Image: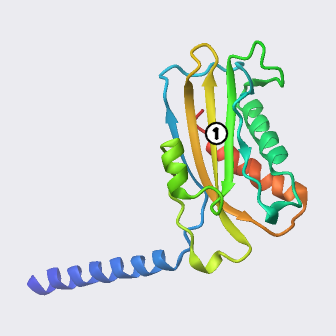
Amino acid sequence: MKKIVLLSFITLLNACTTNATQQNSTPINRPVSVQVRYDTQTIPVGSLFSWSSGLTGMYQDARLIHTNMDELLKKGIVNALIEKGYQFSENVIGAEYTIAYTAGLESALSDDEALQTFGVLPGLVVNKDSTQNVEKGTLVIDVINQTTGRIHWRSSGQTLAKLEQMPQQQRQQRINQFIKMMLSDL
């Protein structure tokens, strides 16, 4: 009986060791996001959104000079809102909620600065082997209730941004997927 229990225990330990080795060999460069709801009220479908006057936008980086990241981010946010059943207008008059976002590569918006400024940090761990032509990027999206003037909801996401030139449509698709993930619980 003792041999069976000991043999079962050894088999269990070997299984755990094998799984740990497999996990360590897997890169940890998947996009991550954290979402915080500051108001218990849900935003009704059909609500009207617009851009906030306090919009920071993208921290500029010479390595991304070949693309207009602000345009791509705005398009991705508007598309995600509409897909969720909300409305969007460039005109802030009549909007129930406004959107502000801040985006930057790690060299311009460090994890420490993002945490100190926004109070949330997704904590993307970058695999050192995958840092050539990519850099960790952070995107923070705020939804502001126009009635109260307060932040209603915030999402902070991190992913690896490709620095080399790529077709605009491909970059937009990557951004759209990332923003859709970030706004999933809005």
Using a 10 Å C-alpha cutoff, classify the residue at mark 1 as few (fewer than 14 neighbours), some (14 to 19) or many (20 or more): many
Which amino acid does the dot numbered 1 rest on?
Ile
Q: Could you tell me residue 142's position as x and y percent?
A: 62, 34
* Point 41% across, 76% down: residue: 19
Q: Could you tell me residue 126's position as x and y percent?
A: 57, 69
Q: Is residue 24 above or below residue 69?
A: below
* Point 16% across, 84% down: residue: 6
Q: Could you tell me residue 17's position as x and y percent?
A: 35, 81
* Point 70% across, 31% down: residue: 84
Q: Is residue 101 above or below residue 45?
A: below
Which residue in the protein does label 1 denote?
141
Q: Is residue 37 above or below residue 109?
A: above
Snapshot colouring = rainbow
Q: Could you tell me residue 178's position as x and y percent?
A: 69, 50
Left or right placement of residue 17 versus residue 33 in this view = left
Q: Is residue 116 above or below residue 45?
A: below
Residue, far left: 2
Viewer-side residue, 84 vs 37:
37
Q: What is the quadrant of the C terminus in the image?
A: top right
At mark 1, the secondary structure is strand
Viewer-side residue, 85 vs 64:
64
Q: What is the quadrant of the N terminus in the image?
A: bottom left
How many marks the image carries: the answer is 1
* Point 56% across, 15% down: residue: 148
